[in-house]
Image (spheres, rainbow, N blue to C red):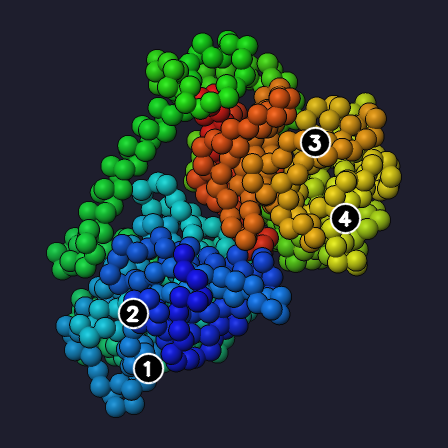
Amino acid sequence: MFRRTDFKKLELFGNGKKNTRVFKVKHIKTGKIYVLKEVEAHSLDKLNEYKEEAVQLSKVQNHPNVLQFYGYYFYETPHNTYKLGIISESINRELNLELIYRKRAKSRQYFSENELTIMIYSLIDAFAYLESVGICHRDIKPTNLFLLENFQIKVIDFGESKEFVDEDDEEDEHSALATIRGTPQYLSPILWEAHVINQVKHVEHNMFKSDVFSAGLVIFQIAALKDVNGFNQKTDNCNGERLIYEGLRMLGKKYSNKIIDILSLMLKFDENERPNFIELVRYLAKNNEYTPRADMTLIQYLEQKKINKANKYLQNNNDKNSFSTDYANNNNNLVNNKNNSSQSSSTTNDISDNQKMKIFNQYKLRNKLNNILTLKNAFWFEYGGNMIARHIISKNDTKSKWRLIAKYKSSFSNHFLTIFAGEAFGFFLIGGTNSNNTLQYINNQIIQKNSMNIERSFMSCLFLNINNNPTILAIGGYDYSDKGQLSSIESYDINKDTWSMNVFPDLNIGRSQASALLFNDKKIFIFGGYNKNYGTLNSIEEIDINKKICNLIEMKLPIPLRRFASIKISENKVIIMGGITRLCKESDATYILNMENYNQVKYNNLPKAGTIEHEVYFDEIGDMHLFYENKYGTSPPTHVIFSFLDFNSI
């Protein structure tokens, strides 16, 4: 990672959205010229959001038609803001496709058939590669494309891109609920209608096929040297489908049927009839007209992906089944060194799901894991909006996606926490940035409850049902009135619909963004979090439920953490997963903490780094279903499966 002092700014290229400025810079040590995109963020949350562009760029560096990314830096300014710098290759600004379009449109200088063909194929190949690694660009327009001297297209600006990974090689025709991103003129028809007519923030659609329509509009605009206003609309005053038909008919007088046929596919008004980029590549390759530029052609890449997937499947099954059936009958829960996994039997590689279910149920019983959640559905409630979506929880299911199921008559708060309070009470939405800070979701209805005494957010919540007294605890958090972290704990009696203070003792350190865990019917642990005086915390507090005493314990987290998950996985052990460390770095680390002897073991990394504040659910064979927060609650969380059975090989 670079430092800002590594570069000297030579020229300001321009200003953009999101407090963005673009510079021509020189690397002081080597003298090389780069482009610096510098973004100012007014909070750590925004800084992490802007860092996503650098993350996406780093994932797509194996294709010559994608902007070359070299690294990034960030720092805190004297004005209590943060700046992120993204370093990329330097490209002649005169090659920007928007500038070229304007010049050629003014002089009516059309591209030749061969020039346009190269442009189309390179554009499709680049975006098909992005699709194959699970990246949707979501803002395809001439401004974000460069036309090189050999008429190849280069893709830039991943500020609106989104990771949407599907592990299945075959294209998934199902749509997903996603936030609307992009420039209105280049949106697909379904996005334009949702954004302009219905004025909603999210819509269920196929993001890759929406990108295809945007790319088709760009190609048509460049080929016809004509604006594409209205092409994505269908209203009483404008029929975009008719405009496309007439436009392609006229364009057919200049270019061959080969080009018109490709554009016809890309500009299908109904996304169900429109191919994605990978399908376009296969269509072109089938006609023997297409040779991608990448070092490995996309067709080869897809074939290699099948091989890799098969190998990964075998490896995962070997890993999952590296514990032996002897272990299931062993009174030892989790050993303290994962190197011992090599001693496990390999005779269980063919273990069935029914056997896994039996082992998992035995494991829960033996380790007294009474509080783990084994739900069939997860729910998402839109921060600051009114969307409600559902995600099915099922074993071995990596294809399920969020489905919009309802809209709340009002708007939800921001930064509330969702907690499941058992089948009898359903879900509760606790806290946030307005006075209506306690809502119950049960039987597909939102019920407003009495509010907390303090308007708090970023707290930890626990559901307790001790002595048949169903209670929710709101622990610590951030007080928007006093602008600081809270040490108080509020107790909500579900049956009486009342919030009470002073039922439980205050924390020793005011903390927000901590992780709370009901360890048993006697103990609660509060891990990590954030305090404005101490920063991200690694301390742990223990609450004695019966004695109503709260103490800091000697053991500390292996690293300071906030916005992470903690789950009890044996009678005396807890796993810590994900979160954010100091300097706003997202963590993919997991740690096993022994809460009796205070031993700690670093375990396998998660498939993805990030914030895990949603509750963790288990399926019937013991796999954990993690939900990573996306866009700070304004988009449905990302679903990842992490195998619980792997813990047996620690």
Q: Whole-Å distance between the Cαs marked 2 and 4?
A: 49 Å
How many neighbours does mark 2 have within 10 angstroms: few (below 14), some (14-19), or many (20 or more)? few
Q: Nearer the viewer, residue 64 or 39?
A: 39
Q: Nearer the viewer, residue 241 or 65?
A: 65
Secondary structure at numbered mark 3: loop
| Mark 3 to mark 2 CA distance (whole Å) | 52 Å
Residue 100 falls in image quadrant = bottom left
Which quadrant is the N terminus positioned in?
Answer: bottom left
Are the two marked residues, 2 and 4, in contact with CB atoms closer than 8 angstroms? no
Give residue 495's position: percent from left, percent from top: 83, 34
Mark 3 vs mark 1: in front:
3
Label 1 packing within 10 angstroms: few (<14), some (14-19), many (20+): some
Question: Is residue 122 positioned above or below 401 on the image?
Answer: below
Which dot, 4 or 1, sits closer to the camera? 4
Name which quarter of the figure residue 646 lies in. top left
Residue 240: percent from the left, percent from the top? 40, 72
| Mark 2 or 1, closer to the camera | 2
Q: Are marks 3 and 4 in contact (CB under 8 Å)?
A: no
Could you tell me which residue is drawn at 40 percent across and 75 percent down? Answer: 9
Give the mark nearer the N terminus: 4 vs 1: 1
Q: Dot 3, crowdedness within 10 Å: few (<14), some or many (≥20)?
A: few
Instruction: Give the labeled residue for mark 2.
Output: 32
Task: Name which residue type carries label 4.
Answer: Leu
Say which label, 2 or 4, has the lower sequence index: 2
Q: Amino acid at mark 3?
A: Ile
Marks 4 & 1, CB-CB < 8 Å contact? no
> Residue most toward the front?
29
In the image: residue 130, left or right of residue 554? left
Q: Would you name the residue on which mark 4 appears?
A: 486
Secondary structure beneath dot 2 equals loop
Q: Nearer the viewer, residue 596 or 253?
A: 596
